[in-house]
């Protein structure tokens, strides 16, 4: 068989989690919480099962959940999406991203992506027969930023899609109004569509606000907005998320979605719809994670790691060049095996080999877990 994805192996997240477990390391690699979700959410889902919500839901998702999402987007970002025609429930953000790409990208089309980039984007583009075009973020003392002039220069008549991700995995960068303006200037007058990966929308710190494309009518009109309940509600294993997009885009999305998964887990959708009636869980999330971020950053100050900013997400990137000259993947493995703390090399988020001396830690962990990790890192 000739592989459709000849360059793809096992994801770095799986590799590092396996190594962490083999070596008994504290796993700050793969991004997932090591604490449980709200028991009320589990109750809401189990009640839905007991009430008999166990057969196929509507193809586009349970209406109550789509309505709850539309209400939330309206309240937070001021755009009204029609739950019937503009919101679709997906099997996590991964499926949403793949489906958005498959329904828009024709063979030979170019898709502009910004590196470092989440690892599912490039294979998804390749499966659609598209060509990924890369622009790299710049990294300096102030952290990472998007060089918009380079993004503009990379646009060609073949550019079909531009993908953004804010808050950004792995860098923790959060787009500002000036970034959104730069993006709008680039796409205005073109046919370029946008996929906006906003899975970390409720993890923005220091009082900053999440610049959802939903806030910008001219961007929202051409965007698939992707989010994931896994991140917001500490249930990464439930694989449930959604896409919000104007009706014409959603109609194309749904054509692919119905033959991709057809429908998504019914009782979880019902349970999630009930749970979403209370906005506190996502409104409280920035404070919850900012405290963990600060605890982790404070502990790292005693080491020779240089801390990069973490404006959002549950990731903290560090420059280890004062500690080691190893390439990132080797350093991450050494750190896991010898120091007992797993991290993710940022080089894994680049298409071409690239060494910046930076690794990513996930701080979505119990305080005890973070303390244990910090004790082990203290010698560095
Ligand atoms: N996009 C980004 C930027 C992510 O970090 C993740 C999760 N690691 C996903 C998409 C996938 O989300 P899900 O688990 O809901 O498929
Ligand atoms: N998104 C998570 C991360 O960046 C991991 C998801 C996965 O393992 N595919 O760590």
Image: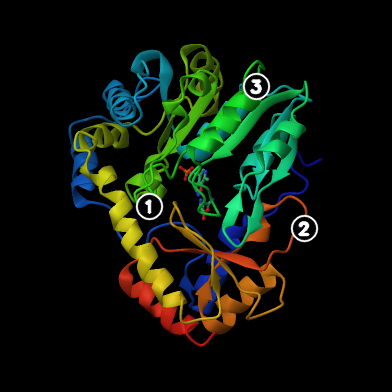
Looking at the rendering, which quadrant does residue 279 occupy? top left
Name the residue furthest right: 2
Q: CA distance from mark 3 to mark 2?
A: 29 Å
Name the residue furthest top: 248
The residue pinned by badge 3 equals 192
The percent position of residue 87, horizontal first and vertical second, equals 40, 22
The reply, left or right, for residue 262 in relation to residue 148 is: left
**How many residues crowd around disc 1 within 10 Å: few (fewer than 14), some, or many (20 or more)?**
many
Q: Determine the residue positioned at 40% across, 73% down.
A: 298
Find out whether the residues at labels 3 and 2 contact each other: C-beta distance under 8 Å. Answer: no
Mark 3 or mark 2, which has the lower sequence index?
3
Q: CA distance from mark 1 to mark 3?
A: 31 Å
Looking at the rendering, which quadrant does residue 85 occupy? top left
Mark 2 or mark 1, which has the lower sequence index?
1
The percent position of residue 260, horizontal first and vertical second, equals 54, 27
Q: Is residue 226 above or below residue 141?
A: above
Label 1 vs label 3, nearer the camera: 1
The residue pinned by badge 2 equals 353
Q: Secondary structure at mark 1?
A: loop
Q: Secondary structure at mark 3?
A: loop
Q: Determine the residue positioned at 41% across, 41% down.
A: 201
Q: Is residue 320 above or below residue 282?
A: below
Mark 1 or mark 3, which has the lower sequence index?
3
Report the disc number at residue 371. Answer: none
Q: Nearer the viewer, residue 28 or 322?
A: 322
Report if the beta carbon of the residue with label 3 is closer than 8 angstroms to ligand 1: no
């Amino acid at each position: 068989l000739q592989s459709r994805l000849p360059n793809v192996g096992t994801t770095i997240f799986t590799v590092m989690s396996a190594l962490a477990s083999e070596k008994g390391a504290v796993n700050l690699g793969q991004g997932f919480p090591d604490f449980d979700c709200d028991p009320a959410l589990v109750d809401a889902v189990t009640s839905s099962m007991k009430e008999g919500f166990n057969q196929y839901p509507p193809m586009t998702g349970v209406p109550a959940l789509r309505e709850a999402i539309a209400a939330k987007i309206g309240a937070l970002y001021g755009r009204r999406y029609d739950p019937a025609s503009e919101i679709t429930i997906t099997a996590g953000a991964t499926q949403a991203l793949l489906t958005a790409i498959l329904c828009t990208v024709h063979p030979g089309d170019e898709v502009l992506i910004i590196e470092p980039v989440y690892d599912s984007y490039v294979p998804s583009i390749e499966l659609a027969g598209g060509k990924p075009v890369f622009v790299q973020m710049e990294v300096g003392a102030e952290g990472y930023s998007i060089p918009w002039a380079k993004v503009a220069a990379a646009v060609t008549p073949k550019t079909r899609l531009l993908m953004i991700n804010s808050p950004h995995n792995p860098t923790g960068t959060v787009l500002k109004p000036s970034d959104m303006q730069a993006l709008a200037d680039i796409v205005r007058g073109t046919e370029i569509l946008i996929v906006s990966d906003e899975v970390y929308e409720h993890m923005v710190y220091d009082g900053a606000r999440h610049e959802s494309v939903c806030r910008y009518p001219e961007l929202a009109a051409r965007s698939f907005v992707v989010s994931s309940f896994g991140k917001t509600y500490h249930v990464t294993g439930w694989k449930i998320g959604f896409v919000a997009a104007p009706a014409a885009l959603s109609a194309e999305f749904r054509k692919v979605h119905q033959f991709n998964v057809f429908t998504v887990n019914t009782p979880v959708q019902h349970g999630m719809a009930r749970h979403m009636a209370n906005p506190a869980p996502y409104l409280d999330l920035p404070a919850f994670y900012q405290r963990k971020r600060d605890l982790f950053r404070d502990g790292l100050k005693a080491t020779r790691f240089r801390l990069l900013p973490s404006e959002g997400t549950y990731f903290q990137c560090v420059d280890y060049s004062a500690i080691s000259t190893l390439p990132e993947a080797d350093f991450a493995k050494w750190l896991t095996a010898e120091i007992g703390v797993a991290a993710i090399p940022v080089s894994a988020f680049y298409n071409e080999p690239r060494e910046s001396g930076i690794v990513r830690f996930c701080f979505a962990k119990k305080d005890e877990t973070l303390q244990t990790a910090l004790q082990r890192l203290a010698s560095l």
